Image: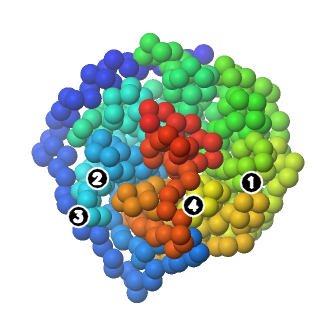
Amino acid sequence: MRSLFLSVPLLAACADRPLAPSPGPSHPRTSIEPDRRYTPDPPPASMAPGWGAESPILLPTADGASELALTDLNGDGRLDVVIAGHSSLQVLFNEDERRFEVASFPSHGEAFGLAAADLDADGFPELAVPYDFEGTVGVFAGTSRGPRFLGKWPTGVGPVSVQLRDLDGDGRLDLVVGNGSDNVVTIARSLGDGGFEARAVDGFAQPSDPAIADFDGDGAVDLVGQVHGGLAFRRGDGRGGFAAAERLALRGGLGAMTAIDLDHQGPIDLAVTSWGEGPMVLVLHDALGRRWRELSVGVEPTDVEAADLDADGHHDLVVADHRGERLHVLFNDGQGEFERRLALPTGDQAHRVAVGDLDGDGALDVVSVDLNRAQVFYGVRTGTRAANTCAPRGSACEPGLSCCAGAPCFSGACL
């Protein structure tokens, strides 16, 4: 068992401290106007009953963007867009009237993932970034001016994703790292004194994007990851431990996963992107796959997010279709059926997607990234419903508004 040491008092001390100096201008912000130009023609607004999207705006991204997160990085009450690139973290600070200011910060390595959460409850979210080629995760302290690099800590081989979850119910966030080049998920459990204790959870095969939720309804957080020919399900014991892997055979290659409550009739369900047997999203009505279906989607689905876009009380799916150059919105009818759909043209090969209310109008917005730019689809209410029924990842969790798909609320934000 390896020990990682990250000082929580150090995080708190950094919160109001200026950013470390760097050669030249210190991370200047540049005001950018949204670019609505497309080649060859701008796509029209896309509308469906209950929710639609305006014609997208385009924003520059970091070099070789690999992941994005929506989080209120500077504590002004608006969700910002954070993008991890090969050599930088780019922050699109969300200003009023749908304007953004962009600032780039050194990523201190080739970043392959991104997670955001307020680890020290100071009002500024910290960032965790895995470095695939180094076998480490970097941690950045949140400040009023942007992220400040603290250091790197070892993980498994080829870390490509990171999530922050309370695995043992102690009220502290732990690190969960998906490793794309070995057979383990790295768990770094918070010790509460500023340190983390890391261990490897085996039973997987290159688990690049594990899913974390209470899938069996026993009150403990479980872990689902990829294996050859399917998925491995490890039941949590509520104390940070996991039982032996139970395997589910599935066809095709498996990619991104997200937890989703399909029908409010039992434990949390799971949606998984798949290819090889045809482009699809596999929807599992429980993590052991006793009841599941195949949803044919696009050309090459690479990412999937769950959120209640049309505010009907049911979690919908948003799928990034890389080679199809589309985002596909699959509306849930409340019985776990997704007959009603909406396609959002991205104009390029978007591979990651996130959902949140960027402009505070009550309608959820959708953001996607490709290697060169971000697309922002501002949502529009097309029905009579006036309020969201759940808060997506990165958004504030408030009284009467729970997090989508049973996600936990930590320091006032949904993880």
Query: How far apart, in angstroms, are the residues tagged by discs 2 and 1?
Result: 36 Å
Look at the numbered disc 3 and give the secondary structure of its residue: strand
Task: Nearest to the eye among marks 1 and 3: give it.
Answer: 1
Percent across and percent down for residue 321 are: 58, 67
Q: Nearer the viewer, residue 393 or 252?
A: 393
Q: Which part of the image, by quadrant, shows the N terminus?
A: top right
Mark 3 or 4, nearer chain start:
3
Location of residue 220 with respect to 269 vertically, above or below:
above
Which disc is residue 263 wearing?
1
Q: Which mark is residue 311?
A: 4
Q: Is residue 54 visible?
A: yes
| Cα–Cα span, label 4 and label 1 | 14 Å
Tell me the amino acid under the disc marked 1. Answer: Asp
Compared across the picture, whether 342 is left or right of 19 comes to: right
Query: Counting residues from the N terminus, which is met first, the one under dot 1 or under dot 3?
Result: 3
As drawn, 383 above or below 272:
below
Q: Name which of mark 2 and mark 1 comes first in the sequence.
A: 2
Q: Amino acid at mark 2?
A: Phe
C-alpha gap between disc 3 and disc 2: 10 Å
